Image (cartoon, rainbow, N blue to C red):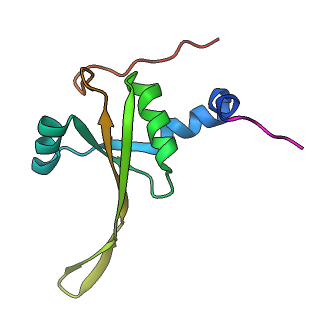
Amino acid sequence: MNTKTNTEKKLSQGYKERLYQVLLNPLITEKATKIADSNNQIVFKAIKNAKKSEIKDAIEMIYKVKVNRVQTLSSKPKIKRRGMYEGVRSGYKKAIVSVQKGQEINFAAEPAKEKAN
């Protein structure tokens, strides 16, 4: 039986590759900047099947900050029409990440990369 603890799973190469795919991009909207200024929270767009623990691990690994809490919500797909043509804009998962006081994520700077062993 192959049982791994959570820390061993975090160290595996496959899990690290998954974490780099979890976050799609930060959401920069008027509401997101208001949340960031008042509550020390950042809003990210994530893949649909991402778990809260994966989002937390991904942000801690990529941006080197300590995450207090992750809240998620799923945005449903929207039907869009252009004349007689109809299409679907895909849905996504939104992650609102609360970072510890005194820490912030600077999107202008390049994220820290791990050294290859």
Horizontal and vertical percent position of residue 112: 40, 18
Residue that sits furthest to the bottom in the current view:
84
**Which image quarter is the N terminus in?**
top right
- Identify which residue is drawn at 45% across, 38% down: 56
Is residue 100 or residue 49 the one in the foreground?
100
- In the rendered image, residue 21 lying in the magenta stretch gets the answer no
Query: Is 16 rendered above or below residue 109?
Result: below
Horizontal and vertical percent position of residue 3: 81, 40
Horizontal and vertical percent position of residue 117: 65, 11
Left or right relative to 49: residue 68: left
Is residue 110 or residue 56 the one in the foreground?
56
Left or right relative to 47: residue 71: left
Query: Is 39 rendered above or below residue 8?
Result: below
Residue that sits furthest to the right in the current view:
1
Magenta residue span: 1-5
Dominant secondary structure (helix, strand or loop) of the stretch shown in magenta: loop
Left or right relative to 93: residue 79: left
Q: Quadrant of residue 23?
A: top left
- Identify which residue is drawn at 18% across, 39% down: 39
Q: How many marks?
A: 0
Is residue 4 or residue 105 the one in the foreground?
4
